[in-house]
Amino acid sequence: IGIWEDLREEKPNNDTLNFYLGVSHLAKGDPITALTYLDQAKRVGDGVFIQEIHYFIGMAYLKNGDRESAITAFQYSGLDESTTILKALTE
C-alpha cells in the first residue's frame, strides 16, 4: 500500500493505482478508505477495471453495512459474481 500511495502522489487520477489501493484497503478490513480510492478509480468511467471497481464498491458497502448502496453497485458491475450476490441479497 505504501508504494502505491507514493506512486499515487505523482498520478492521483490513475484508475489502476486507485483500484489496487481500494482493493488493498478492503482486504485489510477498511471499507471506508477502500471506497475513497474505488470512487476515484470509478471517475475515469471507461477504465479497464470498471466492472471490477463496481464489484468491489459493492463489497465495501456490504462490509460497511450499507445493503442498498451495495445492491446498486453490484447492478452496475455486470460480473457473474455480482449477479450471484445480487440474487442472495434480493431473495
Image (tube, helix red, strand yellow):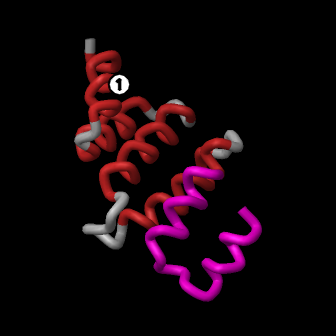
The residue at the point 38 percent across, 43 percent down is 55
Residue 19 image point, x, y percent: 50, 61
Task: Indicate the amino acid at tag 1.
Answer: Ile
Tell me the residue that label 1 is attached to. Answer: 85
29 relative to 46, above or below: above
The residue at the point 45 percent across, 45 percent down is 56
The residue at the point 66 percent across, 70 percent down is 4
Q: Which residues are magenta?
A: 1-24
Magenta span main SS? helix
- Element assignment for label 1: helix
**Who is closer to the viewer here, 46 or 67?**
46
The residue at the point 37 percent across, 58 percent down is 49
Count residues near mark 1 (Cα–Cα under 10 Å), then give few for <14, some for 14-19, many for 20+.
Answer: some
Furthest toward the right, the residue is 2
90 relative to 7, above or below: above
Q: Would residue 70 appear left or right of 3 to someone viewing this image?
A: left
Residue 65 part of the magenta-drawn span: no
| Quarter containing the C terminus | top left
Q: Would residue 40 appear left or right of 76 to someone viewing this image?
A: right
Residue 20 image point, x, y percent: 55, 59
